[in-house]
Image: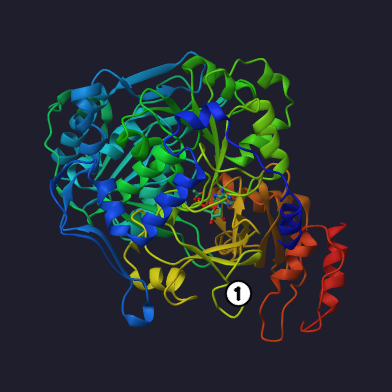
Amino acid sequence: MSERTDQLVSQRGEMFYPPAAFAQKAHVSSMEQYRQMYRRSIEDPEGFWAEAAEGFFWSQKWSDVRRFNFKRSQGPIDVQWFAGGKTNVCYNCLDRHLATRADQPALIWEGNEPGEDQVLTYAQLHEQVCRFANVLRGLGVKKGDRVTIYLPMIVELAIAMLACARIGAIHSVVFGGFSAESLKDRIIDSQCRLLITSDGAFRGAKAVTLKLIADDALDSAAGEGWRVDKVVVARRVGEGKGVDCPMTAGRDLWWHELMEAAAPVCEAEWMDAEDPLFILYTSGSTGKPKGVLHTTGGYMVYTALTHRYVFDYHDGDVYWCTADIGWVTGHSYILYGPLLNGARSLMFEGVPTYPDSGRFWEVVDKWGVNIFYTAPTAIRAIMRMGDELVQKSDRGSLRLLGTVGEPINPEAWRWYNEVVGEGRCPIVDTWWQTETGGILITPLPGCTPTKPGSATLPFFGVEPALMDDEGKETSGNGVSGRLVIKAPWPGQLRTTYGNHERFETVYFSDFDGYYFTGDGARRDEDGYYWITGRVDDVINVSGHRMGTAEVESALVSHPAVAEAAVVGFPHEIKGQGIYAYVTLRLGHDYSDELARELIEHVRNQIGPIAAPDQIHWAPALPKTRSGKIMRRILRKMAAGETSFGDTSTLADPTVIGTLVEMKSK
Ligand code: 6R9
C-alpha cells in the first residue's frame, strides 16, 4: 500500500480542468457553486435533503427529514431518513414519468451477440413490471417477503427487481457468476421462499447453465432445512444450445407462461420511507458475506441526486453503466438512479472482449451513448489490446466518462482521457461502496479540476474524515489515515440483514461516532482524497470484493488441505489477484495437478471470481508466538519482494526460508 501512495503522490502536480463547453451546460458549473451547495448540505442537511426529496411522489409526506444515533456508546446505531413519509420506488421510477415520457426509451438492452437488442419504453417497462408484480402477488409474495433473483443481464432482471419494489417485497439479487454454494448461503440467510432464475446465460462465445446451479443450491438448502416453494424460470438460452433446464413439477414455473396470464394493471404498495427495499450480499474481512440492507426513501433520493449531479445527467442523454446488476453499481446506477431521473439506461448482457475488444465503442456508436461509466479493470484490459480498436470507432456522442470499483492507476486514467475521450470528456472517478448505496467521493464533471488517480472531493451531504493510528481525527491537509464518514447520508445501509450486532461491530466499533469504510486514504494539500485501498482483509479483484477468509475456508474444505492463508498481490489487469498459501494434510503430495484441482475447487465453492491466481505450497506458515499468521510477510512475498521487515516476533523464523524456496519450485 505504501508504494501505491507514493506513486499517487508523485502525480499531484497534474490537473485537468473541465472543458468550457461542458461546464457551460452543466448542473454545477463552478467550484464556487459546488462549495456553496456543499456548505449548505452540511450546515442545513435537513433543508438540503428535504428539497431533494420534494421532486418525488410521496403518498404521505415525511414528518422528520432525519433522525439518527451514530454513536455506539450512546445506544444502538439507528439511521432514519424521511421518517413518517410514504412512497414507492417503483412508482417513482415508472408511473411518475408516464405523463411526459411514456414512449421514451427507459431500458436499452444490448445483447451478447451484436445485432441482438431490445428497447423498452417507460410505458412498456411499466406494463411488464405491473404484470410481473401481479405474478408475484399471485404466488403469495407479500410486503416484506424476500425474493432471491439469480439472473443474467436480461430485461427480466430489471423487471423482477422493480416488480418486487412495487409490491414491497425485498429483493436479494445474487450475481449470476456465483456458485451453487454461494447462492444457497444467500437463500438461507435471507430466508426467501421464492427464487427467480433463467435456463442459462450467454457470456461471450459460450452459453452457460444457470438453472442446474440453482437446482443444486435448492437441493443443498433443503438439506440444511430450508425449502424454497416456487421457482420462476425465464427462458434466455432455449433448446439446442447444450444447456439443460429440468423443471420440477409443482415448484418450477415458466416466466413467459405466468406473464401471459397476468393482468397488466397493479397498484403500488405505499411503503414507509424506512421499509426495506433490498438486500445485497457483500464480502467482509470475516465470516460469510453479509446482507447489506437498504431502505426506501433515503436510497431513492440519494441515488437519483447523485446520478443527476455526478453524471451531469440531462433529459435525452443516453447513459451507459457497464456493470452487472448483480453488484451495487448496477442496482444504483443502471436501474434505480437513472430510472428515477427518467433516463435512457443501457443494459449490456455481454463482455467487453466479445466478439472483440472494440465492443464497448461499437455499442457507444450504435446507441449514441453520451455518458459512459465503467471499471478500471475493464479499461486496463482494453488498453492492453492497443489503441486501434478504439480509434476505429467514432465516439463523437461521448460527453462524460466515469470509473468505479477500485483505485484507477494514473496510466489507465490518462489513456481513458486521451484515447477514449479524446481530451474532451471529463472523467469522474467515483468512490463508494455497497454499504453507501451511492457515490460519496467524486468530482462533479462541470466544475472539479481532476487529478489522475484521485476521487477528489465529497458529494453533497458527505463528511469524510481520516483517522490516525491512535484513533483520532486528523486535521488539515497532507495527511493520511483510515477513511471514515462523520454523519449519516440518505443512501447508507441501515443494518446487515438479520444481524444488527454485526452491523454495529463491523462499521461503528472501530471509531465511536463514525462510519468506518474499511479503506485507507490520503488527503493532499488541496484537500483531495486519494483512496489507497482496503486496510482490512478484503481484496479487490477486478473491482469485486472478496474476503480472504472466504477463499481460505473454501480451500480448507478440500480434503487435502490442512491450512490456507490468502492475500492479494498486484495484478496488471485485475488490480489485485488472489494469492493462496496452502499447507497440505499428511499423506498428500504437492503437485501442479493438485494446485489446479484446488483452484477448480474454489471456483466451484464460491465462483470464478474467487479462483486463486497463484497457489504457493507452504509446509508451514509464518506465525507469531500467539499463533497469528503474519500476513504482512505473506503479502510482501506474494508481491515478489525479498526483504520482509521485522521477523523477530515469529515463533519459527526459519519458516521464511522454506517458503522462499517453495516459491521457486
Ligand atoms: C461501488 C463498489 C467497495 C470498495 C471500496 C474501495 C473500492 C470503489 C473506488 C474504490 C478507489 C474508487 N473502490 N470505488 N477504490 N477508487 N473510485 O465498488 O462497491 O463492490 O462494495 O466495493 O471498492 O476499496 O471500499 P463495492
Here the colouring is rainbow
Question: Residue 361, percent across and down?
Answer: 58, 21
Q: Amino acid at mark 1?
A: Asp
In the rendered image, which quarter is residue 379 located in?
Answer: top right
Q: Nearer the viewer, residue 368 or 602?
A: 368
**Does residue 449 lie above or below 560 as drawn?**
above
Question: Residue 257, percent across and down?
Answer: 22, 25
Where, quadrant-wise, is the C terminus in this rendering? Answer: bottom right
Say which element carries label 1. Answer: loop
Q: Nearer the viewer, residue 183 or 586?
A: 183
Residue 660 showing in the rendered view: yes
Residue 139 relative to residue 409: left or right? left
In the rendered image, which quarter is residue 156 located in?
Answer: top left
Question: Residue 375, percent across and down?
Answer: 57, 40
> Disc 1 marks which residue?
468
Question: Residue 300, percent across and down?
Answer: 30, 46
Residue 421 relative to residue 201: left or right? right
